[in-house]
Amino acid sequence: METRLDGTDIRNGRIDPRRSAVSSAMSKPIALLLVAGAAGLAGCVPLAITGAGVGAAAGITHTMGGITYRTFTAPMPKVKNATMVALNKMGINGVKTSKAEGNEVILANTTGREIEIQLEPLSQNTTRMRTVARNGFFYDSATATEIIIQTEKVLGNT
């Protein structure tokens, strides 16, 4: 049995019509199934990543610049105290506090990082925390997130 370049069989000098018809008829559905399957799987990865991120740090918001935010249902003095305890637990020293435009500003330094925490009272019982940790020119959102998580733990224990 000879085979032509297009994959069809030649028997006794003739093209076997069954072979060529079957192979071309089968190749189209298989190709369509492969394309549809690949297109269907393309949407799963972003959903899986989003789902993992939502559960990892619920309630903490990040911006593109590495600034981390969290709003607490607690008065500003209580959040400030919890933040100071969290920084102390984390071994972050050189803490200075000041007031600017009705907000509390906490500045700290640790191992090549400059940390700035701004506490903004939204109401008597609601405080927004903005945390920035810089490592030179780069933002360290992991450290900023950890400060917020530790503050939340301290608030939960009081």
Image (cartoon, rainbow, N blue to C red):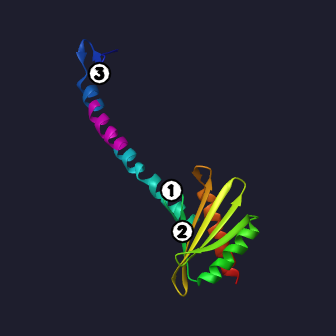
Q: Secondary structure at mark 3?
A: loop
Residue occupied by mark 1: 65
Residue occupied by mark 2: 69
Asked if one can make out residue 60 in the rendered structure from this viewpoint, the answer is no
Picture quarter with the N terminus: top left
Left or right: 31, with 71 as reference point:
left
> Contact (CB < 8 A) between labels 2 and 1?
no
Left or right: 39, with 140 as reference point:
left
Say which of marks 2 and 3 sits in front: 2
Nearer to the camera, 39 or 150: 150
Q: Disc 3 marks which amino acid? A: Thr
The Cα–Cα distance between marks 3 and 1, rounded to whole angstroms, is: 60 Å
Q: Quick one: which residue is furthest to the top in this view?
A: 13
Q: Disc 1 marks which amino acid? A: Gly
The Cα–Cα distance between marks 2 and 3, rounded to whole angstroms, is: 66 Å
Left or right: 68, with 23 as reference point:
right
Instruction: Determine the residue positioned at 26% across, 35% down.
Output: 25
Say which of marks 3 and 1 sits in front: 1
